[in-house]
Amino acid sequence: MSVIVVGAGPTGLMLAGDLAAAGIPVKVLERRAEESNLTRAFAIHARTLELLDMRGLADKLAAEGLKVDEVRPHVKGVKGDGVVFNVRHPDSRFPYLIILGQARTEAALAERARGLGVEIVRGAEVTGLAQDGAGVTLTLAGGRTERAGYVVGCDGAHSAVRRLLGVGFSGRAYDTRILLADVRLEADLPLAVNPFMGDDGVVLLPPYGGGWYRATIWDRTGQGIPIERPVAIEEVRDAMLRITGRDLGVAEMRWSTRFLSERRQASDYRVGRVFLAGDAAHVHSPLGAMGMSTGIQDAANLSWKLAAADRGWAPSWLLDTYQPERHPVGRQVLRLTDTLRRVAEAPPAVRAVRPYLFPKIVNHPRVSERLRLMFAGMAVTYPTPGPATATPLAGTRVPDLALTLDDRASRLYEQLGDGRFVLLDTTQSLPPGDDPWPDRLRVLRSSRPLLLGKATTILVRPDGYTAWTGTFPSGEQISTALAQWLSR
Ligand SMILES: Cc1cc2nc3c(=O)[nH]c(=O)nc-3n(C[C@H](O)[C@H](O)[C@H](O)COP(=O)(O)OP(=O)(O)OC[C@H]3O[C@@H](n4cnc5c(N)ncnc54)[C@H](O)[C@@H]3O)c2cc1C
């Protein structure tokens, strides 16, 4: 086997599907015997939708979920609709976030992976790991072994792979408990994510549609309740009434849990032939709804690099870019969600100024723009790897450019998703028919004059970020860029 993915959560399923799409033999080992039907992550952010779009999944998920493009914080002491935080992304096909239970996203990723030939082995718990220069041997509960060239631990917050590697997971457990509940409300709330901030705590209410909401409740007064005690609907009613100051009419509850979240990050995302991704690499507060999206983005970053390494053409430095590209993103997500947690748990002195400060911060154009991009994963940029030529826009997200190919309208994201780079050229610098590496590169000759900024030629990485740009480059400059990224 070329690659074994441990864990069939959203991260592992995305990664396995990508590897299979690139033609790499891949197997998923999953401890659970059954598919998960837990809600957990409720939101898919814009950049994640774009990555899913490259894989043909986003339109289906967007049609199933509820599109929301505003967050309307109801802060005690602020009158009316004083604070509206818009999460619209004008340059994206997905100018919103989608509210959809995690089980639906996982089901779509699993269906894609299976359709591409991925074997998902359930009831397979990894308990041992040993690696040598040629591969990795995993031991499963029961004593059976499996061997592969590479292993990726996508096995969640309590990752066995991380533990078996001896990788540190520093940080801390928050001592505040969060209560999660999927509830039906009789009250009519704006079609937005609705956080309520009161003296007793915070209630976050994103809508699923049909009157159902995911309630994330941080209740200052309920912190002494044992974590294992089941959540009663009366407790949810009482906490929501006290915190929001309104009777929202909690009519039904279909799922609930008490949750003690943590803030931790793995020190190393790679040890030899073994990688960590998703919650195995980083965990944080669910405020901001960034956990699943960050894991899916880890997978999109790693999959094409592993495929290139398995095929034998990856530049020697390529696999080493996973840590410097994704570790800082994980760190920033930890910081951002921690800031949200601090705002939510504000001590009395901060609560007193919240009604004055909050609208100022959220309505400040530059601050709100930055926050919007950060939450959605649209602000992620990657450093140019040392041996590659640094050019303008390198490492930034490439938008879904409209293309005209052979007189037909197309768009860039339709051309990505199978693990190949895309060279978009408008200058005819590469002679027609010159496709130097068809197994790893798709050459698209577009009739539009300019692609992005002043770039007439763009080398797009398989994950939709810019590798290299040129303005009327010579054929030799293009060949050099291709050789840097696409050959050993
Ligand atoms: C109660 C709860 C609420 C949450 N709410 C939100 C939210 O509102 N918004 C948000 O964005 N995120 C939320 N999250 C986080 C989000 O669910 C995770 O970020 C996301 O599931 C990460 O995906 P993953 O694939 O990396 O890990 P997981 O989804 O945890 O998947 C890991 C998989 O690995 C399997 N596994 C574990 N150990 C082994 C082993 N030894 N061998 C084989 N398989 C193994 C597990 O069974 C599991 O299927 C929540 C999480 C929890 C627990």
Image: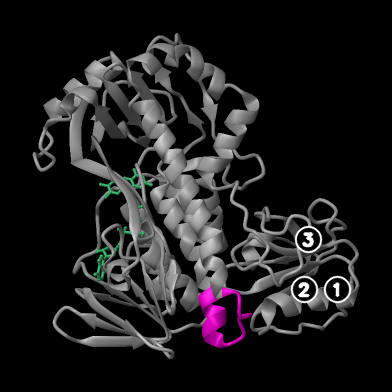
Instruction: Using the image, determine if residue 189 lies above or below residue 172.
Output: above
Q: Is residue 264 left or right of residue 142?
A: right
Residue drawn at the location 24% of the way across and 55% of the way down:
37
C-alpha distance separating marks 1 and 2:
6 Å
Mark sitting on residue 391: 3
Check the image and name the residue furthest to the bottom.
134
In the rendering, at what x and y percent does residue 452 appear?
A: 78, 53
Magenta span of residues: 304-318
- Colour mapping: one colour
Q: Which residue is mark 1?
A: 477
Nearest the viewer among 354 and 45 is: 354
Mark sitting on residue 338: none
Give the mark nearer the N terminus: 3 vs 2.
Answer: 3
Image quadrant where residue 166 sits: bottom left
The answer to if 266 sits in the magenta stretch is no
Query: For the residue marked with disc 3, what is the amino acid?
Result: Thr
Question: Dot 1, how many residues are within 10 Å of its Cα: few (below 14), some (14-19), or many (20+)?
Answer: few
In the rendering, at what x and y percent does residue 319 appear?
A: 54, 74
**Residue 224 in view, yes or no:** yes
Query: For the residue marked with disc 2, what is the amino acid?
Result: Ala
**Residue 59 in view, yes or no:** no
Instruction: Using the image, determine if residue 90 lies above or below residue 117.
Output: above
Question: Dot 3, how many residues are within 10 Å of its Cα: few (below 14), some (14-19), or many (20+)?
Answer: some
Q: Which residue is mark 2?
A: 481
C-alpha distance separating marks 1 and 3:
12 Å
In the rendering, at what x and y percent does residue 449 appear?
A: 88, 58
- CB under 8 Å between discs 1 and 2: yes
Q: In the rendered image, which quarter contains the C terminus?
A: bottom right
Residue drawn at the location 51% of the way across and 68% of the way down:
302
Residue drawn at the location 68% of the way across and 68% of the way down:
386
